[in-house]
Amino acid sequence: MTKNIVKDSILEYYKHVSQTQVEILKHETPKIELAAQKIVEALKNSNKIWGYGTGHANEFIQALIAIPNSIPFISPILSSMEGVYDNVEGLGVALAEQVDFKKGDIFIFVSISGKHPLTIEIIQYLKNKGVYTIGLTSVTYSGSSKPNNKWNVRLYETADLFFDNHVNIGDTCVAIEGIQETVGPISGVMSMFIAELLTAALAEEFEKQQMDFSVWRHPHLKGSTDHNKKVIEQASQWVNYFKN
């Protein structure tokens, strides 16, 4: 019988992913549970939960709004100011001023480096308005280089609460002989992992606080069309894009 042999590079990537997930469960679970409590309390008080991610870090926000079996609770902020504009001073405030933030709202910001002007400007602006800020970043990656903003801080140093995705410097984790650069980035996998942990914690917290909520049903399942119409009707009280 022919054996299915997995190459060392694949096993190496799997090893780093699984080890990092263990670290996240060990260190981030209490913060994820706290975030779920804060989010449900905010929604009960008719506040909104906003989300924004720079570049590919926006995968975290997408996981919370666009995947079947997620809970529609977050209002995404869409902008063309991502990636190449992170270092331009003043754009963070300009972006924040376009959104009708209220005191008591929650803002989730995703940036793996967490050090650029766009990131810190938005966080500082919102904290001054009484918005509770949650960051998703890499403490190791972000802490390895000097902040390039006038506050001289990083996302994990200024957000009210932060999740560490435990990604190493450079993000990648697999070195292959003959190739100069390492491969196998894991920040996207870890961000999605944390997003799903948060979704599970939210479902538990909604039930604990006896607050009515709905979950997107996969469109391929029977009755999904009628079910998801009811989900949209219910979530429209929380999520801004259902009203546009």
Image: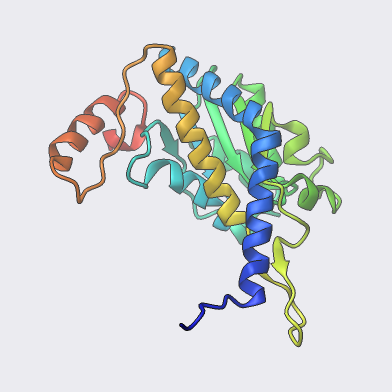
Q: Position of residue 24 (x, y in %)?
A: 66, 41
Residue in the image at 51% along x and 41% along y: 195
Q: Is residue 111 above or below residue 2?
A: above
In this rendering, the answer to whether 77 lies above or below 37 is: below
Which residue, as the protein is rendered here, is positioned at the far bottom?
178
Q: How many marks can you see? A: 0
Camera-side residue of 99 and 219: 219
**Quadrant in the rendering for residue 177:** bottom right
**From this viewpoint, is residue 46 visible?**
no
Q: Residue at x 44, y 48 (%)?
A: 62
Q: x, y (%) of residue 140?
A: 80, 49
Which residue is nearer to you in this view: 221 or 101?
A: 221
**Where residue 186 sits in the image (x, y, percent)?**
63, 59
In the image, is 43 to the left or to the right of 236?
right
| Rendered view: 30 above or below 60 | above
**As drawn, is 194 to the left or to the right of 44?**
right
Residue at image x 75%, y 62%?
A: 170
Q: Position of residue 82 (x, y in %)?
A: 57, 55
